[in-house]
Amino acid sequence: MPDLPELAASFTAALHNAGIAVGPDRTRSFARALTLLAPSTTRELRQCALATLVSDREQIEPFDAVFREVFGGPADRSGAQRGQPGDPARSLPDSVPGRVPGARKATGDGHGPEADAQPREAPVPLAASPLDRLANRDFAGLSAEELARLSEVMRTLVLRTPTRPSRRRRTAHHGARIDVRRTLSVSRRTGGYPLRLLRFEPRARPRDLIVLCDISGSMEPYARAMLQLLYCAARAARAEVFTFATRLTRLTPALRRAGPDDALTRAGRAAPDWSGGTRIAECLAEFNERFGRRGMAHGAVVAIISDGWDTGAPADLATHMARLSRVAYRVVWVNPRTASPRYRPLVAGMAAALPYCDAVVSAHNLAALDDFIAALSAPRHRR
């Protein structure tokens, strides 16, 4: 019985061969819909696929044809053209592109004219893949092998930040400023008279992403998962990554290695305070002094991954958080403890930092990473 990725890939490949534009985004939506809805019949499966893979009325007819070839059963809307009672049963060769072996199954005995005449509700050949079973499990309960398996999914995630205007510029018909140099250059063709004013606007580029990850004893399981996410998903964003427990360590050079296992191993060697105590206020003060004032945090999106346990004074943490929030574009705090519905910000460090955060998310498992990604790309709002 095929697993979920095989089912989604086979069916969408068959649709693509039939001329229906199905991209990776629709394939991912189809796979996620199968996981959430768990259809048990081909009729429910068709509705699920129709809602996620079809964008035009003209695509419904070829969609139904492919659906009948791959899955069988009552795929058409009106129930017509299913054959007449007594017609010989039609079967597809195994060489049909995109067909899932064993997908055509009928309820009952499946023989005789009555079986062809009555609508059939066939069981859908779905089986949860190992990655689907790990999607809702807490990172703290995953082994090293299970965490390594999630790297395949983490590579498909994209960490985007809001854009900011840069010093580079591009030509724009309705730009706010006039490009004097190009206007005078073009005016040579008209005898030096600038008959046409050329305009420009600044180019937009993504804002920098800075991640401060707590690697103390209480955060060690989540720190490994988040560092793996940053290696797999944030390489395109060129994120700056720091770890802290009793000291601040810059891990960006270590995370630029060839593989995730090697990168995490080098990260562990570079951070001697792994699984140690927590001094959030002191490490944040060091970051503000050494990197924040030099311009690294100016206009950047800063993500702090910590549960808020701090051995220092809460007033010191509030002071340094306020200083960071004044230069950063957006501050996102990632606290896995907030996943519990009974969570309250009673920890002194978390309570002191909360007023200076633009968003607080849990990111405690793979499914919760969507909130983390959305918080990084959201626009800034007044606190």
Image (tube, helix red, strand yellow):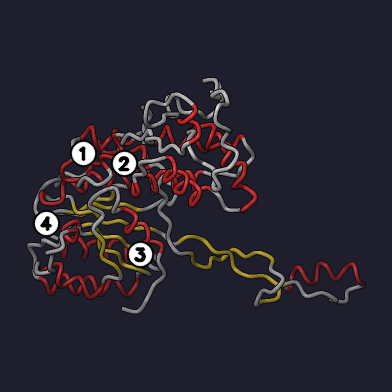
First in sequence, mark 4 or 1: give its number.
1
User: What residue is pinned by disc 3?
Assistant: 297
Residue at point 54%, 64% (across, down):
204
371 in relation to 62, above or below: below
- Local SS, label 3: loop
- Amino acid found under the numbered disc labelled 4: Thr
Nearer to me, 79 or 7? 79
Query: Mark on residue 278?
Result: 4
Residue 1, horizontal then vertical, whole percent: 36, 27
First in sequence, mark 3 or 2: give its number.
2
Quarter of the image for the C terminus: give it.
bottom left
First in sequence, mark 4 or 2: give its number.
2
- Local SS, label 2: helix
Residue at point 23%, 70% (across, down):
321
First in sequence, mark 3 or 1: give its number.
1
First in sequence, mark 2 or 1: give its number.
2
User: What residue is pinned by disc 2?
Assistant: 254
- Dot 2: within a 10 Å radius of its alpha carbon, few (fewer than 14), some, or many (20 or more) residues? some
304 in relation to 183, above or below: above
Residue at point 25%, 45% (across, down):
225
The answer to whether one can see residue 228 in this image is yes
Q: Are marks 2 and 1 in contact (CB under 8 Å)?
A: yes
- Dot 1: within a 10 Å radius of its alpha carbon, few (fewer than 14), some, or many (20 or more) residues? few
Query: Mark on residue 269?
Result: 1
Real-space Cα separation, disc 2 to disc 1, in angstroms: 9 Å
The quadrant holding residue 329 is bottom left
- Amino acid found under the numbered disc labelled 3: Ala
- Local SS, label 1: helix
- Amino acid found under the numbered disc labelled 1: Arg
Q: Are marks 3 and 1 in contact (CB under 8 Å)?
A: no
- Amino acid found under the numbered disc labelled 2: Ala
